[in-house]
Amino acid sequence: MNNELLTGDLIRLTAEDPQIYAETFSRWGRDSEYTRLLDNDPARMPSITKTKEWFEKFSEKEQVNETFFLVRSLEGNTLIGFVGLFGIEWNHGDAWVGIGIGDRQYWGKGYGTDAMRVILRYAFTELNLHRITLGVFEYNSRAIRSYEKAGFIIEGRFRQQLHREGRHWDEIMMGILREEWMENEK
Amino acid sequence: MKNDLLTGALVRLAAFDPQTMAEALSRWGRDSEYWRLLAADPARLHSAKATREWLEKEMDNKLSSFYLFSIRTLEDDSLVGEIGLEGVVWSHSESFVGISLGERRNWGKGYGTDAMRILLRYAFTELNLARVSLDVFEYNPRAIRSYEKAGFKVEGRARQFLNRDGRRWDLIFMGILRDEWLNRKQTSTIA
Amino acid sequence: MSDMMEIQTPLFEGQLICLAPIDHDKDPEIESQWTHDSEFMRMLSTEPMRPLSPAQVKKKYEAIEKDLEESKNLFYFTIRLRADDHLLGFARLYWVEWTNGAGMLKLGIGSRTDRGHGYGSEALRLMLRYAFTELNLHRLSATIPEYNPVALHVFAKAGFVEEVRRRQAINRDGRRWDLIHVGILREEWLARLA
């Protein structure tokens, strides 16, 4: 049995109190390139206070259909992002994954891919899910490459789902099955 | 795909309405044998109001791990009992099941076995659980027989768990696995 | 079909059916029966089917009304027969993303005897017109399980195309099924009307 379930090669997943990470999250929220890579909602900038309140409310309720982790670099223990599973449909064994690396210094260096590997291992060997789904915007080529490396397969596109900078963009849907993940791990 | 998922040969499973069930549970609970077959807590008499408040509170928090149903006869749609999965542990795909039939005149007619068969079909083909567990008192042989007919196997006993009427009794644990249930399907009357 | 675009043409009335608000007194009893029909519930949703009492349906309606008031991302309608106003089903536009012009659509005709008469197709036509000419959305999406060929056909006839196939996303009745996302763009809908 793997007893370093939440540790990867470059990062580890943690659970922490909102007051520790609210300021960092709020700062990342001021980087519109980050928010536009991450989110369908219009870019906004929540204050540190609002961010803290939101996460406190979120952690108060017992989460049955979601899990949320912070991502910290192993070297230096820097908080670099988050990763989580949400919309877990237990009866079907299907869940969505969401990931964001807020710290630009850690873009394009394999940290996101590593965090994705760790969360997939958690999903398939601890939550015993059958498949994981994600959506990624067509203009986020770095992420698309990272997800393909992690084993995700493109399952289709929501055509013209986003409207930004005066044009429409597709949202690409990807999925990975447990048996595929196990094959890749060999 | 199987339709009429919640319909059996004698009964059907229907909505578990807190108000209706609170009144029924309170009434049934006045027969101490009903209570003593079902619960380890000392027999007490609960009002419908208290029962409803308790049900509403329980169901409010745990909607994603409780799947409760009322049991109604196909013949005249009368409410004869309740059955449900209480506390699904999703990452392990397993849950406990509990069942009770309210009135003595409805005991021994096969309603319980029929309801349990429907519930297992729901557990294994809608919730896709890997196993279902239950516990039952040694002094309830009618229930033990019914559970065995539905496919449960005895897995263990907590010896001398209960103290009632001047002696101690075992608590018996039973379980059924999805694979076992899938194989039974071919021989049972409910497909 | 330029008359479809006129302001006078009713948004909420078709030939046989109409879109209407919830009737909090009459509807809970009827919808309670639908929730006991496993065939209907399994066609409609991937959530485990769960029968509800009329009181529980009433509470659900209250939550919908609250959401309609507060969120502005939800548009919920009942589908009723014009002849006698009886409840046939529901239709809703949800998860509306205003800045992107995107929304999700779900509708269902609850009773087995009310299906197969074209009520669903008619309701779908009204919903498309509402979404594209009143809400001014750019695209609509719906999810349909692979085992619901009737819905796949109704949506395809209305102009939706298959966009995403989530492999083995559903586990029901002892086997796995795909979940299909279908979508339609406003320009496609307009082209079909011409």
Image (cartoon, coloured by chain):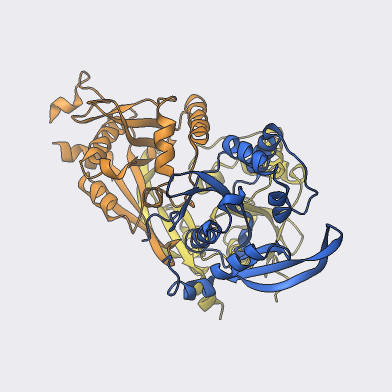
Chain colours: A yellow, B blue, C orange
Of C186 and A73, which appears nearest the observer? C186
Q: In the rendered view, tell whether residue C7 sits above or below residue A35.
A: above
| Above or below for C13 versus A54 | above
For the C terminus of chain C, which image quadrant?
top left
Residue at x 43%, y 52% (from the top left corner): A139
Quarter the N terminus of chain C occupies: top left
* Residue found at the very far right of the displayed protein: B166
Does B135 sit left or right of C61 as displayed?
right
| In the image: residue A125, left or right of residue C112 | right
Do we see residue C26 in this rendering? yes
Could you tell whether A47 is left or right of A132 in the image?
A: right
Q: Position of residue C145 (x, y in %)?
A: 36, 55
Q: Is residue B68 visible?
A: no
Determine the residue located farthest toward the top in the rendered image. Answer: C8
Q: How many marks?
A: 0
Depicted A150 relative to depicted A135: above or below: below
Of B6 and A34, the residue lying toward us: B6
Q: Nearer the viewer, residue A9 or C169?
A: C169
The x and y percentages for residue A176 are 48, 66
Residue C182 on image: x %, y %:
32, 50
Residue drawn at point x = 37 percent, y = 42 percent: C106
